[in-house]
Image (tube, rainbow, N blue to C red):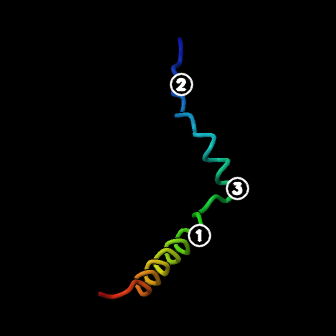
């Protein structure tokens, strides 16, 4: 008599590595956006009015 054993779905090996590294959010995007907004406001302020 043969038994059929269901195998589990293979796990993604990259997930375990990222969890060990404590992967998280990337930082710096909001500061870059804020600097861009400030630059645009400054350029608008310096533009001569008609």
Question: What residue sits right under mark 2 in the picture?
Answer: 5
Residue at 54 percent across and 68 percent down: it is 29
Q: Mark 1 or mark 3: which is in front?
A: 1
Label 1 SS: loop
* Nearer the camera: disc 2 or disc 1: 1
CA gap, disc 1 and disc 3:
19 Å
Residue 45 shown left or right of residue 23 in the figure? left
Quadrant location of residue 19? Answer: bottom right
Question: Which corner quadrant of the image does residue 21 belong to?
Answer: bottom right
**Please, is residue 1 above or below residue 27 in the view?**
above
Residue at position x 49%, y 72% in the image: 33
Q: Secondary structure at mark 2?
A: loop
The residue indicated by pointer 1 is 28
Check the image and name the residue furthest to the top: 1
Mark 2–mark 3 Cα distance, whole angstroms, equals: 34 Å
Question: Which residue bears the numbered disc 3?
Answer: 21
């Amino acid at each position: 008599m043969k038994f059929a054993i269901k195998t589990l779905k293979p796990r993604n090996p990259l997930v375990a590595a990222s969890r060990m590294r404590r992967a998280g959010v990337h930082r710096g995007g909001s500061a870059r956006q804020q600097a861009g907004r400030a630059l645009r406001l400054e350029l608008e302020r310096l533009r001569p009015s008609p």
